[in-house]
């Protein structure tokens, strides 16, 4: 089937099998910043913002995600113009292999939109759906705190 | 402390922003034109002979291009262990055999136009199995009448004990002194058996490999591998393709932890592409990663120690390790060896010692390399036993370690005796700040305020503290080799090409820092390319805690040669003797005259003006010893006397890894290792049913910790200076995983006086133990 997707501010007419997940549609159309870490909605590597809310895109039927804004990590920042969240995670040492990072970036974005000054509890809660096997999460917490400071200043 | 400008600084990881924005590409992110999708058919039986396999129905399906199985793929014995050649692991594996040896063994592979078609085709392969008796228990497997797994022509490539007719995948034996006499002289003897289960690395990126033919018809393989050069060599051998026709590239990789030091997928994509001429893609699902790749070896360790009461000396020690290799002997010898060789030298003053290990085949998943590599299992035993001994002596365990651990200038007979598939290498310790690690860790955890105090933050919750000291190694001496190539560009920047493999650890960054230190330039002037068998020089790959120490020294040598050439050109430009010149902030300067030239001027001169040549260099490095990093790790736990739940309140590591080239990355290595250690201490393990089928194959059932489970983790980096390492560095990648299990078990004992000799220490086990000891408190 065909559908209109609003990805990172651009409109895409995409063809996809009816049972395809949003993750599959995104990855097969070049949005490979959205990662595939499990198949069960349990790792968060595939997180994107759908209507501003972080969702595991592997659990979303593509057909239900048409005509709604979708934001990926690339939509927030690029190598030349990284988002303050991306820069802060990088600086804090929160990025080891980086496979979990694009997902964590979008969840952090959603968190800081709502809660610019999150407590540690709020950070832990917001990122709880993300598995990171490399960092032990310590530096990710630091990175999110740093991002909150930076972003507040930038705004 | 030596002053450094580029190393010993927490430089941002050079690929971090690229990764955080999602620009960086992992294996599965590469596009292939018109690829074949590969899917594997796995054995549902733990042990069976394939009487017949009929692929015709699958082949007839529209969109199926090929079905590979024993009928059309030559039987080439090899090991999947990505180790140096000749590998110390037995050659007992073929791509597709007529026999399957565990639930998850490969039976066939389909190549099709879409993943869906491939999936459908798998169902149409008709396989007739003759189910054979299976064996899952290590001791059972060693009995004379046990089913045998490898009964054909499997062999060991090097002369090591290997006897598949007894299911013996490897055996190690070593002793010095006279243990019997030692035990006879001891005032008391303590003997316990410790068990650690099957565990999964579960790197977040599932294993993936792609292949295509380049315009010359060469086979290019992109793979999530820790060992690109070994992958090329083994793939060439298995497929019978000349090595020169294969190129292996490791792009960004989503973690490894040892799980990708294994040549599993490269021969499969290579096979499909070489046979069909089409690109191919093979990406495992999370479930496949869990049941069909590699695991941490299950182990059972019997540890016997004889102790002299007056000074607490261990006068005799016997360690007997029984290791479950699973169905194939990948790393079966070397992991086992490390259980002794990376633990016993820590207490180097034991006069009588014996280590015996056996690694046995069973019909369970295959063990492999896993961060800690046998030492982790060994420390679970040794770390608790030391606690038990110290308590028996009425001695503070910190004092026990300080009195008996190996020190600078000292050696251990174990170093010489136990190598990797051969004798080890004698070595003397040049750097050891373990005492300081112990003191600073003790302070951070509040050892003296908390030990034995059984503080109760709530009426039914009680706290305790425990600790352990440990060592690891840095690279495999006289075996591992790393190398580097550098050249200078017009603008005074440099390309640095290394075979070393960055798994997300940050080794590209660390190696760039080392080059930048030699040349005194900002790290961003170094452009790193790593892990491409066509473009980068050889490196054994990322394992055995080797990259910083081994490949780092290759880079340092290479950069020194570049510096020499720069000074030679500058001497010509400045009309000054080269010996008088030095480098400073990206310039070659003459201290005598104050004159200097920038690297850019040097580059432009050497490339375009006079006596033109390319400033470039290569260097290789092997190491003659494997200096251990040291660590002291402390746990504070809280045990719920009603539910048996154990929570880690605080975990402290104080590590001596020589000069920390990048302190933040050092902390990250330790923190990641610690959390994985805690995970496998308290809840995660493989569970199997009585048919050998793994039962927990997703992140819910094989529970991985998330932010919610994160305890307070403190990491203290204690500098030392290792004279044989680049700028004083040793390794840090593995050591942090050794402490959590024994330190937590010791802390639980401190809280409730109950020993757990087996991990994971689940709430159910604690609950039962509390009940058995009559200290379970009823829920109100
Ligand atoms: S891939 Fe979607 S949650 Fe893991
Ligand atoms: S950095 Fe590797 S999984 Fe998070």
Image (cartoon, coloured by chain):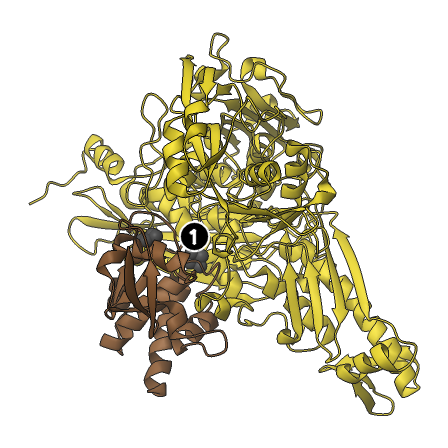
Chain colours: A brown, B yellow
Q: Is residue B469 left or right of residue B700?
A: right
Measured from the top left, where is residue B267 in percent x and y? 58, 37
Residue A74 lies in quadrant: bottom left
Instruction: Note whether A32 is above or below B237 in the view shown.
Output: below
Is residue B472 something one can see in this rendering?
no
The mark total stands at 1
The foreground one among B45 and B749 is B45
The foreground one among B30 and A136 is B30
Q: Residue at x 70, y 68 (%)?
A: B495
* Local secondary structure at mark 1: helix
Is residue B772 something one can see in this rendering?
yes
Measured from the top left, where is residue B362 in percent x and y? 47, 22
Instruction: Note whether B598 is above or below B239 in the view shown.
Output: below
The foreground one among B357 and B577 is B577
For label 1, the residue is B674
Instruction: Note whether B227 is above or below B12 in the view shown.
Output: above
Q: In this view, does B428 lie to the left or right of B118?
A: right
Work out which quarter of the rendered image holds the N terminus of chain B and state it.
bottom right
Residue B684 lies in quadrant: top left
Measured from the top left, where is residue B165 in percent x and y? 57, 13
* Residue that extends furthest to the top in the rendered view of this protein: B145
Tell me if mark 1 has few (under 14), some (14-19) or many (20+) residues whose alpha carbon lies within 10 angstroms of its own: many
The foreground one among B656 and B11 is B11
Q: Which residue is drawn at 87% across and 72% down?
A: B613
Q: Which residue is drawn at 45% across and 23% down?
A: B56
- The chain letter for the residue carrying disc 1 is B
């Amino acid at each position: 089937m065909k559908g209109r997707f609003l990805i990172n501010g651009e409109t895409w007419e995409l063809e996809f099998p009816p049972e395809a997940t949003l993750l599959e549609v995104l990855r097969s159309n070049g949005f490979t910043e959205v990662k595939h870490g499990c198949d069960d909605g349990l790792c968060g590597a595939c997180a994107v913002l759908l209507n501003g809310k972080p969702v595991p895109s592997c659990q979303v039927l593509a057909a239900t995600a048409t005509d709604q804004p979708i934001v990926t990590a690339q939509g927030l920042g690029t190598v030349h113009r990284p988002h303050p969240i991306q820069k802060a995670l990088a600086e804090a040492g929160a990025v080891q292999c980086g496979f979990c990072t694009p997902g964590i970036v979008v969840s952090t974005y959603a968190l800081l939109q709502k809660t610019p000054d999150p407590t540690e509890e709020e950070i832990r809660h917001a990122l709880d759906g993300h598995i990171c096997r490399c960092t032990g999460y310590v530096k990710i917490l630091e990175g999110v705190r740093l991002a909150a400071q930076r972003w507040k200043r930038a705004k | 402390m030596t002053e450094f400008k580029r190393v010993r600084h927490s430089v941002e990881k050079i690929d971090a922003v690229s990764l955080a924005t999602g620009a960086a590409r992992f294996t599965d992110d590469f596009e292939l034109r018109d690829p074949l999708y590969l899917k594997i058919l796995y054995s549902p039986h733990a042990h069976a002979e394939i009487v017949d396999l009929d692929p015709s129905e699958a082949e007839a399906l529209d969109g199926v291009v090929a079905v590979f199985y024993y009928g059309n793929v030559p039987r080439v014995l090899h090991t999947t262990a990505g180790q140096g050649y000749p590998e110390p692991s037995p050659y007992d594996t073929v791509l597709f055999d007529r026999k399957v040896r565990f639930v998850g063994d490969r039976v066939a592979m389909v190549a099709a136009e879409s993943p869906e078609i491939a999936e459908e085709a798998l169902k149409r392969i008709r396989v007739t199995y003759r189910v054979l008796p299976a064996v899952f228990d290590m001791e059972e497997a060693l009995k004379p009448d046990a089913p045998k797994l490898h009964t054909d022509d499997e062999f060991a490539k090097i002369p090591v004990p290997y006897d598949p007719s007894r299911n013996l995948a490897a055996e190690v034996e070593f002793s010095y002194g006279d243990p019997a006499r030692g035990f006879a002289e001891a005032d008391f003897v303590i003997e316990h058996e410790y068990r650690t289960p099957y565990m999964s690395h579960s790197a977040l990126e599932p294993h993936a490999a792609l292949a295509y033919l380049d315009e010359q018809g060469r086979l290019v393989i992109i793979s999530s591998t820790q060992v690109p050069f070994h992958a090329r060599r083994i793939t060439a051998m298995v497929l019978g393709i000349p090595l020169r026709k294969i190129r292996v590239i490791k792009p960004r990789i989503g973690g490894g932890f040892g799980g990708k030091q294994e040549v599993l997928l490269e021969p499969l994509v290579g096979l499909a592409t070489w046979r069909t001429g089409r690109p191919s893609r093979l990406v495992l699902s999370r479930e496949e990663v869990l049941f069909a790749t590699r695991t941490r070896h299950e182990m059972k360790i019997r540890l016997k120690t004889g102790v002299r009461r007056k000074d607490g000396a261990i006068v005799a020690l016997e360690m007997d390790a029984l290791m479950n290799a699973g169905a194939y002997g990948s790393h079966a010898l070397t992991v086992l060896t490390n259980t002794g060789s990376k633990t016993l030298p820590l207490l180097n003053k034991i006069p009588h010692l014996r280590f015996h290990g056996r690694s046995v085949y069973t019909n369970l998943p295959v063990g492999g390399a896993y961060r800690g590599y046998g030492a982790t299992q060994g420390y679970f035993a040794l770390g608790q036993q030391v606690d038990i001994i110290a308590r028996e002596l009425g001695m503070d365990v910190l004092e026990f370690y300080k009195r008996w651990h190996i020190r600078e200038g000292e050696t251990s007979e174990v170093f010489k005796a136990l190598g990797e598939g051969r004798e080890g290498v004698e070595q003397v310790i040049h750097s050891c700040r373990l005492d300081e690690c112990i003191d600073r860790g003790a302070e951070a955890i509040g050892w003296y305020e908390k030990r034995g105090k059984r503080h109760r933050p709530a009426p039914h919750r009680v706290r305790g503290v425990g600790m352990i000291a440990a060592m690891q190694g840095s690279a495999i001496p006289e075996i591992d080799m790393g190398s580097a190539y550098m050249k200078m560009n017009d603008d005074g920047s440099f390309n640095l090409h290394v075979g070393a493999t960055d798994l997300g650890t940050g080794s590209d960054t660390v190696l760039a820092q080392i080059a930048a230190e030699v040349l005194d330039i900002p790290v961003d002037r170094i452009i790193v390319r790593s892990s491409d068998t066509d473009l980068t020089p050889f490196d054994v790959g990322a394992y055995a805690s080797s990259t910083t120490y081994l490949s780092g020294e290759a880079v340092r040598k290479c950069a020194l040669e570049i510096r020499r050439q720069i000074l030679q050109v500058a001497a010509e430009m400045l009309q000054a003797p080269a010996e008088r010149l030095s480098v400073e902030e990206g310039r070659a300067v003459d201290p005598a005259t104050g004159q200097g030239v920038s690297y850019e001027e040097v580059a432009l001169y050497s490339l375009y003006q006079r006596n033109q040549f390319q400033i470039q260099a290569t260097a290789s490095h092997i190491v003659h010893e494997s200096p251990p990093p040291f660590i002291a790790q402390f746990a504070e736990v809280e045990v719920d006397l009603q539910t048996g739940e154990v929570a880690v309140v605080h975990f402290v590591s104080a590590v001596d890894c020589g000069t920390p080239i990048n302190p933040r990355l050092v902390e990250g290595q330790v923190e990641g290792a610690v959390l994985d250690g805690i995970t496998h201490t308290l809840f995660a393990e493989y569970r199997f049913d009585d048919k050998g089928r793994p039962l927990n194959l997703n992140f819910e059932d094989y529970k991985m910790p998330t932010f919610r489970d994160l305890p307070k983790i403190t990491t203290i980096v204690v500098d030392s200076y290792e004279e044989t390492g680049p700028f004083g560095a040793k390794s840090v990648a593995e050591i942090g995983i050794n402490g959590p299990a024994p330190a937590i078990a010791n802390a639980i004992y401190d809280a409730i006086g109950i020993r757990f000799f087996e991990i994971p220490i689940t709430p159910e086990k604690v609950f039962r133990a509390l009940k058995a000891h009559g200290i379970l408190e009823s829920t109100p």
